Amino acid sequence: MNLRNVFGLNLQRLRRERRLSQEQLAHLAGCARAYLSGAEAGRRNATLDMVEALAMVLEVKPADLLKDPAVGRETR
């Protein structure tokens, strides 16, 4: 699984765990809902600034968005 897909799966899981819609998370993180949708689907590359903003809103470390959920470690 590539890093974009890992990021997207983690982003979607964390957003749902916090019971946020894509619209709500996008507003809080300062991005468009369509961008967030694309990131969750692995079609968009997130900038480091956006990873940081999303992590802050989701109250996780930025690295938590990049950990492979299958093995619980960061992807390479």
Image: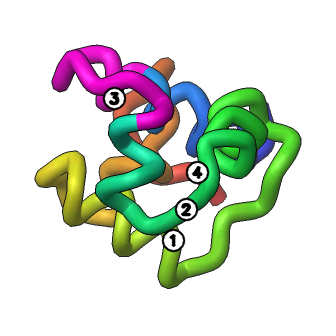
User: What residue sits right under mark 1 in the picture?
Assistant: 50
Q: Which residues are magenta?
A: 13-23
Hey, what amino acid is under mark 2?
A: Cys
Kind of element beneath mark 4:
loop
Q: Nearer the viewer, mark 4 or mark 1?
A: 1
Neighbourhood count class around disc 4 (C-alpha, 10 Å): few under 14, some 14–19, many 20 upward:
some
Cα distance between the residues tagged 4 and 1: 18 Å
Instruction: Check the picture and name the quadrant holding the C terminus.
Output: bottom right
Q: Earlier in the sequence, mark 4 or mark 1?
A: 1
> If you read the primary sequence from the N terminus, does the residue marked by circle 2 or circle 3 appear first?
3
Inter-mark Cα distance, 2 to 3: 14 Å
Task: Give the alpha-carbon distance from disc 1 to disc 3, as whole Å.
Answer: 15 Å
Nearer to us of marks 4 and 3 is 3
Q: Which mark is residue 75?
A: 4
Q: Identify the residue under disc 3.
A: 15
Q: Nearer the viewer, mark 2 or mark 1?
A: 2
Q: Is residue 51 above or below residue 74?
A: below
Name the N-terminal-most of marks 4 and 2.
2
Under mark 4, the amino acid is: Thr
Is the residue under label 1 in contact with that under label 4 (CB below 8 Å)?
Answer: no
Q: Position of residue 71 (x, y in %)?
A: 44, 26
Kindly identify which residue carries mark 2: 31
User: Closer to the N terminus: mark 4 or mark 3?
Assistant: 3
- Is disc 2 in contact with disc 1, using a CB cutoff of under 8 Å? yes
Query: Mark 1 near mark 3, Cβ–Cβ under 8 Å?
Result: no
Q: Amino acid at mark 1?
A: Met
Tell me the mark number nearer the camera, choosing from 2 and 3: 2
